[in-house]
Structures are given as structure tokens and as C-alpha cells.
Image (cartoon, rainbow, N blue to C red):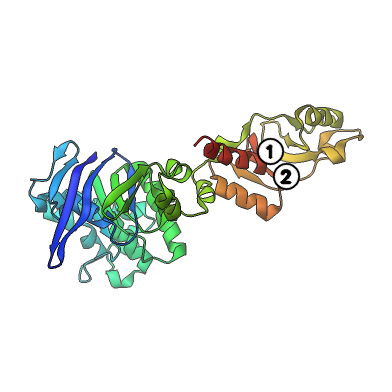
Amino acid sequence: MIRLEDLTKIFQTPSGDITAADRINMDVPEGNICVLLGPSGCGKTTTMKMVNRLIEPTSGKIFIGGEDVTSKDPISLRRSIGYVIQQIGLFPNQTIEDNICAVPDLLGWDRKKSRTRAGELLEMVALDPATFLGRFPKELSGGQQQRVGVIRALAADPPVMLMDEPFGAIDPINREVIQDEFLRMQKEIKKTIMFVSHDIDEAVKMADKIAIFDAGQLIQYDSPDDLLAHPKNSFIADFVGGDRTLKRLRLIRVEDAMTKDPPRVTADDTLDKAVNLMEEHGHISIVMVGPKGRARGVVYLSDARGKKGKVGDSHDKLPVSVHVGEDLRTAVSSMFMHDEASLACVDSDGIYKGYVTQRGITHLLGATYRDQ
């Protein structure tokens, strides 16, 4: 959807020419979020601002949806691209409704259509239209204003969005909430997004692709997991941080790391059966499930060995479980919090699907590095 070909920007200064972006080549697939990262002055913001020609390129090409926009009228181009900035930029003398409808009004949308759209967008970011449409920006918190700034960029339903550190000025708690809401919304709207950030953790969370710049050059362009697992050089490795293995925990889902369809027992099974299954599979515990397969409890080998009777009379409460859709960071956090070396993995209905262990997670992450 967005393709840059040898995109270059040279600024002329009294002390000489400065190459801010040096022959940048990259493709952002339709529906993907691409986060641009790098140290101050590396060229990431210049590159993004050339896409909507807030900065005119010195040379090179910009394609959006296959169309070369380097010669297109820049005002028309900007109206067709959503743009979100850290400073939000809401018009203080206009209601939230009129702020959201600014671009649709410029494009000549029917007023009823644009106002309906404004209400729909507010609902998408968990702001009640009846409460917020008639308010002015000063009556909103900073986090609420930032949400309005994001959805204003979506009002005219642009295929492409540019975002310049959109969550940078928000406190950490609200930033997490807004990021989560944005990702949930992106699953529905599937916009193609170029996103400048200074925060590697934000990039790992938000991006389908990450582009890291230095001194005007694009150094590495990869998926977050490939970037963390296979940094191209020492600059990239230093930039993403020494804790890059821990950062990868956010990228891997529990269902991709768990041992699937493990042995299990029911309340009516004997303790002898439970012991035999654990010994056969080399396990120190086994999950007890209910009639529909929901995880109901756990039996420990050390407690069951040598005992007679039914599992239902001798099981313990399952200390903790994790949803298969969670990331490994959540799983590891639960392990540490509850002092457990393994977790039962369940789906949204509580059905037991497998288990994940500290050793298994360590092996999974380590195998990637050994493959380098």
C-alpha cells in the first residue's frame, strides 16, 4: 500500500548540505502498522512527513495504493491521508463533533453522514457520543483528547494513516489503555499505518513491521520478532536493548509455546490411573477436568503415589491458569507471582488445552538464537 523508492531528502544549510533521508526503500503492506524508530535526527520523522509531503522529497518516489503521489496536489493528498500528532491539535473553539468532522466537512460530505460517523468513531474508543460530542477540548482529559485526535484522522475513512508519536505525551497507564484500544480498533478497520515512535517497547507491541534508522539511512526493516531475534548489526542490538529476549515474550502467544493435548484425568478416575499417567509422561502433576473438559483442579504425583481412591476426593485447587491467547509475558508474570514452574492453558470457555513451562519458554527463545 505504501512504497518508497530511493526516497531522499537533502536540506541545504549555511554550513552545507545535510542528508536527512538517504535513498529509503521500503514497502508497508496493506493493513499493516509500520513503526519507524531511531535516535534523534536519524531521519524517521522526515521520512514519514515526505509521505504526505509536509516535507517535499529531494528525489525518489512515493507510491500509495500503486499511485505515484510525488506529483499529486499536496493539499488533496493530505486530505486523503489521516494524520495524528503528539500535540493532538484539536481546535479549541469547536466541539468534539466538529473537530472530528473537520476533514469530512472540507471534502463536502453530507452533514448527517459526517455526524453519524463522528458518533460511531467515539464509540470505537469507548467515549459515549451522548456525553462527548457536544463538549469542547478543554473539557476532556489529555487521554480523552488523544483518543479524539486519533479518530479525527479516521473520520474521512482514509486508507492510510500517519502517526507522529501519537501516545508520547500520555501517562504510562493511559498510554497502555489507548494503545490497546487502538490495536483492537485496527483489527476492525485494517488501515495501513506509518507510525513514528521513540519507544522500542511501544514498537514491539504495536508494529507488524519495524524500521530502524540511523544517520538518514534505513538500517533494518523487519518483523518485531525477527528484529529482536536477529539484529543486523551491533547498532541494532544496542538500540533494541540487552533485554531483547524478554521483549520477545510480548510477541509469542501462549498457544504457540504450550504443549498441546496433554494427559488429563477426571474426578471419577482412580489415583492409580493419575499416577500411571504422570509417570508415563514424566510429569509431576496432572490436571483434573470436568465433564466438558474444563480445568477443575490438579493432582500432584508426590501426594497421589501410594494412595487409593478417586481423583475427585484427593485433588487440589488449580493455583492459576492462563488463556491461550495471552502473550508469554503474561504467562511468565503469572508463574513468578504464584511461584509456579508451569501453567495450565485454557480457552475462553475454560477448556483445558495444554500447559506451558518455564523450561519450555526458555528452550523456545533459545532455539531462535541458536539458529542465527
Q: Which mark is residue 263?
A: none
Sequence order check: which comes first, mark 2 or mark 1? 1
Of residues 232 and 125, the one drawn nearer to the viewer in this rendering: 232
Mark 1 crowd level (few <14, some 14–19, many ≥20, 10 Å Cα) = many
Q: In the image, what residue occupies the spot 42% across and 55% down?
A: 239
Q: Secondary structure at mark 1?
A: strand
Relative to 286, is 169 on the left or the right? Answer: left
Relative to 235, is 312 on the left or the right? Answer: right
Of residues 148 and 226, the one drawn nearer to the viewer in this rendering: 226
Q: In the image, what residue occupies the spot 76% across and 34% down?
A: 283
Query: Does residue 224 sit above or below 122 in this rendering?
Result: above
- Please indicate, yes or no, whether residue 348 appears anywhere in the rendered image: no
Spot occupied by residue 23 in the image (x, y as percentages of width and height): 21, 46
Query: Does residue 14 sit above or below 102 in this rendering?
Result: below
- Please indicate, yes or no, whether residue 17 appears anywhere in the rendered image: yes
Q: CA distance from mark 2 to mark 1?
A: 8 Å
Q: In the image, what residue occupies the spot 13% across and 47% down?
A: 59
Of residues 168 and 187, the one drawn nearer to the viewer in this rendering: 168
Spot occupied by residue 220 in the image (x, y as percentages of width and height): 35, 45
* Amino acid at dot 1: Ala
Mark 2 crowd level (few <14, some 14–19, many ≥20, 10 Å Cα) = some
* Amino acid at dot 2: Leu
Q: In the image, what residue occupies the spot 66% across and 53% down?
A: 336
Spot occupied by residue 148 in the image (x, y as percentages of width and height): 30, 60
Q: Secondary structure at mark 2?
A: loop
Q: Which mark is residue 318?
A: 2
- Mark 2 and mark 1 residues within 8 Å of each other at the beta carbon: yes
Q: Which mark is residue 295?
A: 1
Query: Does residue 186 sit above or below 42 in this rendering?
Result: above
